[in-house]
Image (cartoon, helix red, strand yellow):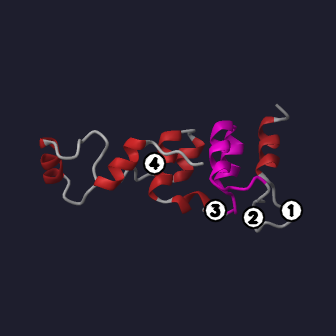
Amino acid sequence: EVEYQEEALDSLEEGLPPYVIPGSPWEAQWWKQNPDGWKLLHHDMTRGVTNDDMRKVDNLYIQDPDSIYALDANGWSLLHEVARAGHVEMAQYLCARGLDVSDKTGDGSEKGETAADVALKHHGED
């Protein structure tokens, strides 16, 4: 089961950053300074996974759950990027949300590499 950070969900529902309490005097002031509203983060998912930034990745996932399935121009998934970076917990997070360790890079043909292939190539059998 997917677990979300509660403050991130509350913020998303209210359209406020987590440091502004809904209904507080600060909320009115914040809206005056930010009339276009607020998003959790405006960074890309790839940077979050390669930097092993679980909070950023989780917040981006909350905003757009389909974002974890995007492939880059070479057919690499986020799981391939994480395997190259060696971030085991991030790989587990992505797999728990539906990324498949058997997906291959490129067009998915036999010549492509799985995330396990990428991890082995960059980190050995550790």
Nearer-N-terminus badge (2/3): 3
Q: Going by the image, does 88 lie left or right of 122?
A: left
Q: Disc number at residue 106? A: 2
Type of amino acid at the residue the image marks with label 4:
Asn
CB atoms of marks 3 and 4 within 8 Å: no
Name the residue carrying label 4: 59
Give percent across and percent down for residue 13.
Answer: 33, 55
Is residue 86 shown in magenta?
yes
Q: Please name which of the two marks, 2 or 4, marks the residue nearer to the observer.
A: 4
Q: Residues within 10 Å of mark 2 (few under 14, many from 20)?
A: some
Is residue 77 shown in magenta?
yes
Nearer-N-terminus badge (4/1): 4
Q: Please name which of the two marks, 4 or 1, marks the residue nearer to the observer.
A: 4
Q: Disc number at residue 10? A: none
In the image, residue 103 sits, relative to residue 59, either above or below, namely below
Q: Residues within 10 Å of mark 4 (few under 14, many from 20)?
A: many
Give percent across and percent down for residue 1.
Answer: 60, 48
Q: Residues within 10 Å of mark 3 (few under 14, many from 20)?
A: some
Give percent across and percent down for residue 47.
Answer: 54, 47
CA distance separating discs 3 and 1: 17 Å
CA distance separating discs 2 and 4: 28 Å
The magenta stretch is 74-101
Nearer-N-terminus badge (3/4): 4
Q: Tell me which residue sits at (16%, 51%) in the image.
A: 33
Q: Tell me which residue sits at (28%, 53%) in the image.
A: 14
Name the residue carrying label 3: 71
| Helix, strand or loop status at disc 2 | loop
Nearer-N-terminus badge (3/1): 3
Type of amino acid at the residue the image marks with label 3:
Leu
Type of amino acid at the residue the image marks with label 1:
Lys
Nearer-N-terminus badge (2/4): 4
